[in-house]
Amino acid sequence: MAGTQVSTVNLTQAPRDEVVGGYRHEAFLYSGQAEFVSGTISFVRRALSAGDPVLVVVSGEKIGLLRQELGAEAGNVSFADMACVGDNPARIIAVWQAFVVAHAGARQLWGIGEPVHPKRSPTELAECQLHEALLNVAFDAATPFWLLCPYDLEALAADVIDEAQRTHPFIARVDRRQASGGFRLIDLADPFDRPVPARPADAATMSFQIGRLRRVRAFVLAVTEIATNSLRYGGGHGELCAWVRDGSLVCEVSDRGHITSPLVGRVQPVLDGQGGAGLWVANQLCDLVQIFSSPRGTTVRVYQDI
């Protein structure tokens, strides 16, 4: 990309008073590498020109492209590889929150995060889309943080782009920025009320109840933590199933509890002895964690590559 002419695109040309003092979660719909670099470089340089903190979380390859284009300016930008930060999408919000806390009092904060890419499995993609929906409730509206989420129109399916427009209040393209007519705020009363994919018919199943938790402790610590949550909040008993799918060990814990906290497991809990750490621990230990919950009950699935 050295020597490439990078044009400024309109997505970063909003009046400053539209951004400062408020949280903005925006999808950037681009076509191919040149538009990605053009749009993100313009965004980053606007932050740098104002002396504001900026964090970019994208693939290692794209970090290399941006560093090369920025040259010496790259030293004033914080970068993180999405493969490390967001392999499990449930870990990403904590990174953004840590960035905001670390720069408390800043006039304006800027971020670029691209969790959705073509190499994501269908299960990972579903969790990325949930992550994007939860980002809309992860920060107070007054937080001066503009978060830009790139989506490649050439590489992603049309339904993925449609979902991006439902999970982002604002949409940016190379020639314009606008509110998203398709945006839908996640149901805060039931953020995890979604269909549970069918488990294999031959999945190994283990029931558990108070006094018999030792059987569950034979599994990984993450599953033990989730099972403990079931005993505390799910009516005192539950069911554990396990199977292997596409190179991953899948463990499922089901109970009669109901999870309504939208950021549970995604932000570090206060260790006050009141619980709430189980799903956080699971997300730190496992490759992927899925939550399905409604008044009918809760199912949590954890995935570990084998």
Image (tube, rainbow, N blue to C red):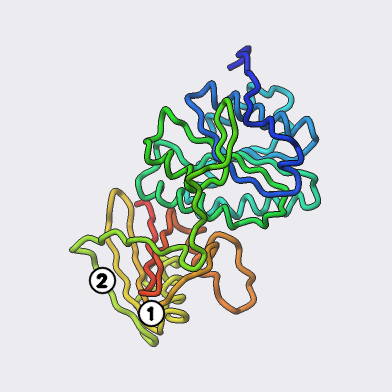
N-terminal of the two: label 2 or label 1?
A: 2
Q: Mark 2 is on which residue type? A: Thr
Classify residue 27 as left or right of residue 51: left
Residue that lies at the very extreme toward the left in this rendered image: 201
Residue 63, picture quadrant: top right
As shown in the figure, which amino acid type bears the numbered disc 1? Arg
Left or right: 291 in relation to 83: left
Q: Which residue is tagged 1?
A: 214
Does residue 123 appear anywhere in the picture? Answer: yes
Position above or below: 198 against 44: below
Q: Residue at x 55, y 59 (%)?
A: 266
Identity of the residue drawn at 51% across and 24% down: 33
Q: Callout 1: few (<14), some (14-19), or many (20+) C-alpha neighbours within 10 Å?
A: few
Q: Is residue 225 above or below residue 47?
A: below
Front position in the image: 15 or 20: 15
Residue 102: x and y, percent? 74, 51
Are circles 2 and 1 on residues that touch, CB within 8 Å? no
Asked whether the viewer can see residue 280, the reply is no
Image location (x, y in percent) of residue 234: 42, 79
- Sort mark 2 into few (<14), some (14-19) or many (20+) by Cα contacts within 10 Å: some
The image quarter containing residue 236 is: bottom left
Residue lying furthest front: 181
Looking at the rendered structure, which numbered label has been put on residue 205? 2
Where the N terminus falls, by quadrant? top right
> Which label lies toward us, 2 or 1?
2
Q: Secondary structure at mark 2?
A: strand
Q: Nearer the viewer, residue 200 or 244?
A: 200
Query: Can you tell which quarter of the image residue 267 is in?
Result: bottom right
